[in-house]
Image (tube, rainbow, N blue to C red):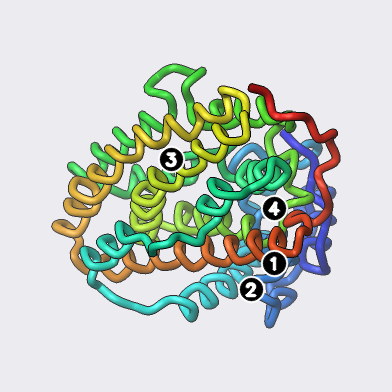
Amino acid sequence: MTSLPEPRGPLSAAVTATLRREPPAPAPPPELAHDCDPWGQDLAIALHTCYELHYRGFDGVSSEWEWAPGLLALRGELERVFLDALRAGTDASDDVAGVLDELLVEPVPGNGVSHHLRDRGQWWQVREYFAHRSIYHLKEADPHAWVIPRLQGQAKASLVAVEFDEFGGGRGERVHAQLFADLLTGAGLSADYLHYLDVVPAPQIAIVNLMSLLGLHQGLRGALVGHFAAAEITTAPSAQRLAKALDRLGAAHECVHFFTEHVEADAVHEQVMRRDVIGDLLDREPRLAEDVVFGVRATELLEGRLADHLLGAWGRDETSLLRPLDVPEPAASS
């Protein structure tokens, strides 16, 4: 377990204050979340704190808070604000094949985060990127596991096959979350779960919140499948560029290995997700096509916001974190 995060405003302060008490203490009223900024630091960390109760929880926080009705009511309002913003920021469509095809087309020349790190990224920027991604990768594949009981037939079987690879194929040392922990150690960073949460800003936290939101709601199962497919389709080319960046910078083997593993695995997962998971899901429930598209486009929206934040900060030669990493800057190993 980890400590409760530092509050970033009245919402998150109210949530953390509540969790420090023993249930059934009263929770903050849902009205507290009315009109809050859906992209702001306060909502991001408040919602992430509520969701973390469904993962590993926090030191000194009663497990009874996970299903406390008052806290769930507040979480529901936070989710409404966040989900409304996601829907407003994406175009509705039921053209699943067309949207997935778009993911396979990359602009030339590319100008994303992985392109920047491959071509001219500095070691301190790579380490910041690792800190951002640690908020998800140390629980990699966990949010997607929630959709398994909500699928049937081939869609269920094939998604479980993808998850089996994500969880190391039955070998603990090959679980992707463990591979990322090894990467962090190789980069001279802490591999402790959520160690960097207090310095990672809202754009990255929102991406993890999206996964939790979609995973925890049966009615959003189509969107979760769309999100998972988008991640698998776009990871292989991005991972290949990041592996080249780390080779150029002389990073430790553990750093490079995490990305080369994803190049191989996700190239296969892309086809499985598209043909066997989405294909079978929509054969059974064609009405979910628009939800699948929403999952893809919401993922693109949030990843784009993170990319803008990272590249904007680095372009100004500033840290992309809320404060600089509090560990010594080691030389990359050869």
**Chain-order first, disc 2 or disc 3:** 2
Image quarter where the C terminus lies is top right
Identity of the residue drawn at 18% across and 49% down: 275
Q: CA distance from mark 2 to mark 3?
A: 33 Å
Q: Earlier in the sequence, mark 2 or mark 4?
A: 2
Amino acid tagged 3: Gln
For label 1, the crowd category at 10 Å Cα-Cα, with few meaning under 14, some 14 to 19 and many 20 or more, is many
Instruction: State how far apart marks 3 and 1 are (Cα).
Output: 34 Å
In the image, is 329 to the left or to the right of 39?
right
Disc 1 designates what residue? 43
Q: Residues within 10 Å of mark 4 (few under 14, many from 20)?
A: many
Q: Which mark is residue 49?
A: 4
At label 2, the amino acid type is: Pro
At 50% from the left and 27% from the top, the residue drawn is 257
Q: Are marks 4 and 1 in contact (CB under 8 Å)?
A: no
Q: Is residue 69 visible?
A: no
Determine the secondary structure under disc 1. Answer: helix
In this rendering, position of residue 122 left or right of residue 98 = right
Q: Residue at x 68, y 80 (%)?
A: 34
Circle 2: element type? loop
To which residue does mark 2 refer? 38
Label 3: state its secondary structure: helix
Q: Nearer the viewer, mark 2 or mark 4?
A: 2
Query: Mark 3 highlights which residue?
Result: 240
Marks 4 and 3 sit apart, C-alpha to C-alpha, by 33 Å
